[in-house]
Image (spheres, helix red, strand yellow):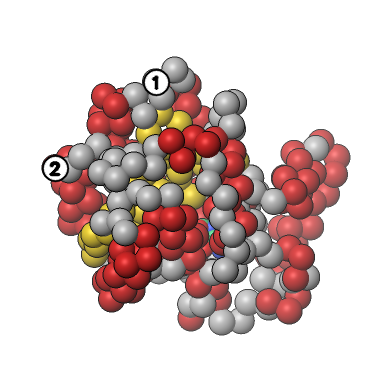
Amino acid sequence: MKQISKTNETQSRNKKGTNPALVTGASSGIGEAYARRLAHEGFDLILVARRNRLIESLADELQKTYDIKAETLAADLATEEGIASVEDRIAKGRPLSWLISSAGFGTRGRFVDVPKMKTIQMTRLHVEANARLVKASLPGMLDNHLGRIVLVSSLSAFLTTAEYVNYSATKAYLNMFVLGLRDELTGTGVKIQALCPGLTKTEFFATEEFKSFKYDAMPSWVWMTTHQVVEESIRALNKRRNTPIFIPGLKNKVFTALLNSPLLGALARAGLARIGHNRNLF
Ligand SMILES: NC(=O)c1ccc[n+]([C@@H]2O[C@H](COP(=O)([O-])OP(=O)(O)OC[C@H]3O[C@@H](n4cnc5c(N)ncnc54)[C@H](OP(=O)(O)O)[C@@H]3O)[C@@H](O)[C@H]2O)c1
């Protein structure tokens, strides 16, 4: 296992009985990696996902390994009931030290063809659940003058192409949401980050819809591990100057800068639109 170095800031907050960290999407991928990292720092955890068996076994493992308390909350955050149950848990407990919102999913297919329910669920999960969980977490964090919020967005927030219409749009919402909140939170002790990973090795592509996704067409260097994504996210949050829209990985930063450049950006976007349209790569 890779050695994880503790940062000064998180080390100083690593005391037994400190406020818990709530992680959504904790059953796999980036959320699970964040949960492991914060457990290593000594934070008690509230793990949220639909697959209760997975979060239960993660909670068991982390409690034994790091001598922390880890509770689980099975919730479907694409439903009113699921979002309300997490809001309720936040309202009734100690203020959160961290809110990591990683729950998310992708769809494929033209917007007109994607089942209506999937569009509704994605918008609920990526937009409504994030806004409501941040709203529920902020009063306690502001009272404490301390808190870290990470909303997992995506590089897709900076670009869109055929077949990823609502995914890109919902992630772009998160970036704008975080930019506005950053201004409101300046000087409060609460920091917020929209974490925008590029391709990351997780279960994200392990769904029926992504069965024909051509992994081999992607060079191995474009992928990041969840460990790399989380470490870079925490390092950025620990810097004195907050970067509200944070892109992990140098290659992802270069790619995004390219997309934003006037001439090359237009060419790159046209290329991506063609790729999406013809479905010859994705
Ligand atoms: N992997 C990538 O290349 C990549 C790139 C950019 C951004 N992202 C973003 O990263 C975040 C994490 O994804 P990942 O890559 O780690 O994929 P992942 O391994 O598939 O994890 C997704 C997590 O979201 C949870 N989830 C999905 N739908 C949910 C719902 N309705 N209610 C509650 N939890 C739900 C899943 O748990 P259950 O199934 O147990 O509910 C799972 O824990 C997502 O927001 C994704 O958009 C991923």
Q: Position of residue 44 (x, y in %)?
A: 30, 51
Return the residue at label 2: 92
The residue lying furthest to the right in this view is 263
**What residue appears at the point 63 percent right and 77 percent down from the top-left corner?**
213
Amino acid type for the residue under numbered disc 1:
Thr
Q: Quadrant of residue 141?
A: top left
Whole-percent x, y for residue 167 in the image: 51, 56
Residue 146 percent across, percent down from the top left: 36, 29
- SS at mark 1 in the image: loop
Q: Amino acid at mark 2?
A: Lys
- Residue sitting at 16 percent across and 46 percent down? 88
Q: Nearer the viewer, residue 71 or 4?
A: 4
Dot 2 or dot 1, earlier in sequence:
2
Is 53 situated above or below 110? below
The verdict on label 1 being within 8 Å of ligand 1 is no
Q: Residues within 10 Å of mark 2 (few under 14, many from 20)?
A: few
User: 183 and 262: which one is in front?
Assistant: 183
Answer with left or right where residue 20 lies relative to residue 186.
Answer: left
Position of 212 relative to 234 (above/below): below
Distance between the Cα atoms at labels 2 and 1?
22 Å
Q: Residue at x 18, y 48 (%)?
A: 89
Relative placement, left or right, of 98 versus 268 is left
Write down the residue under mark 1: 188
Picture mark count:
2
Q: Position of residue 19 (x, y in %)?
A: 28, 41
Residue 199 picture quarter: bottom right
Nearest the viewer among 69 and 199 is: 69
- Is 186 in front, or is 282? 186
Q: Is mark 2 within 8 Å of ligand 1?
A: no
Residue located at (28% from left, 76% from top) = 53
Where does the N terminus fall, quadrant-wise?
bottom right
Outermost residue, left side: 92
